[in-house]
Image (cartoon, rainbow, N blue to C red):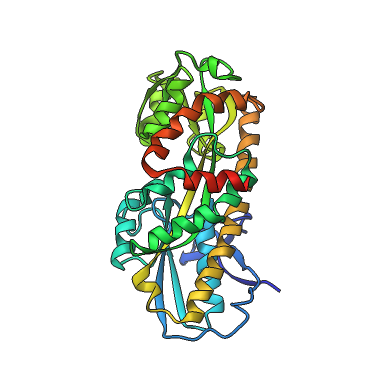
Amino acid sequence: MKKKVIAFGLALSMALTMTACTSIGTPVDITPEPEREVPDPGPVASGEITGDHFSMSLFCGSMAENTPAGGATAVMADYLNEYSDGTIEALAFYDTALGDATSMVQGLQQGTIDIGIAGTSYFSNLVPEIDVFQLPFLFSDLESARAATEGPAAEAIHAMFEDNGIIGLSFWENGFRELTNNVRPITKPEDMEGIKMRTLASDVQIATWEAMGALTTSIDASELYTALQQNTVNAQDNPLHEIVSRKFYEVQPYVTLTDAVYTPLYMGMSKMTWDRLSESQQALILEAADVARDAQLAMVDEAQASAMQTLLDNGCEIVENPDKAAFKERAMPSWSIFTDVYGTELVDMIQNAQ
């Protein structure tokens, strides 16, 4: 039977409205915190957890509490609080509450932050090889991408982080990046010819879209809506739920499901913190990370499905089956930007598992 706690994370249902008084004769509406279910205990959580009491920070970087990553961070905190036999007090933080994502990674190394979650790009200064998961058109489908972030390549990446003072706990995700534009429907690479596209500030991404014929430029995410609205650029790519949350569909009527780049998130733990825990506490952390990953992926699926419906409701023209083989053929040469420096071993691990 699942236990329930008061939610500080993602609200999955509408809360009832109650009335209270802040002073005599002055009623105000109060929305109570909804209850959130704690997942059933796994094998470790069902056993005895021993060790010294430890207050532990779980920091969701720059992501808000009402995102899939924020909601899963709350799930992990609940799991640790519920099943650690009182030995761990997990405190969840969101939306730059403890600094930005870059300083978060530094905090993990220094032991000032215990567990942190952010996009893999924020971790790549320590272990550049983590960018392997974002090579364009590397994965044939979502299932392959998710399997790869739990497979041999992921284990190799975790080992590299341990050498840099961080224990790798889990890969989460932001989803596949999909293409939007305001020029025409895109079904094949040739359709990108001459389109001004905003890309990530990544040599691989720039080379990929220039190979399609696009004119690329890098624009900060905070300025992207205005740039699209003013036709400074005509196209961009992001996961569907980001396209909706940032309202790009208001100025980008054409959406193409290229599945061009898979964008994982990474959860790391300070090795300084890890080394202070008992074996049973460490095992519980690993189990909680797995539970939170499952929750996060389910929340992403829900967010993506909801976003797709929003795009349809707002009249977007969606190309669901573009010529992915042709896109991949154009993109393949850009992989050498990565493999010339870091070799092909990680790429081979991923491809051999598909």
Residue 9: in sight, yes or no?
Answer: no
Q: Is residue 214 above or below residue 285?
A: above
In this view, the residue in front, 204 or 16, is: 204
Which percent across, then down, holds residue 280? 51, 81
Which percent across, then down, holds residue 342? 39, 44
Q: Residue at x 62, y 34 (%)?
A: 310
Which percent across, then down, holds residue 289? 53, 65
Instruction: Spot the residue most to the top.
Output: 194
Residue 15: in sight, yes or no?
Answer: yes
Q: Residue at x 49, y 20 (%)?
A: 212
Query: How many badges with numbers are in the image?
Result: 0
Q: Quarter of the image holding residue 18?
A: bottom right
Q: Is residue 326 left or right of residue 343?
A: right
Q: Is residue 314 left or right of residue 348?
A: right
Q: Quadrant of the image for the N terminus? A: bottom right
In this view, the residue in front, 94 or 155, is: 155
Q: Is residue 104 above or below residue 124?
A: below
Q: Residue at x 54, y 52 (%)?
A: 149
Which percent across, then down, holds residue 347? 50, 44
In this view, the residue in front, 198 or 324, is: 324
Instruction: Spot the residue most to the right.
Output: 1
Q: Residue at x 59, y 19 (%)?
A: 188
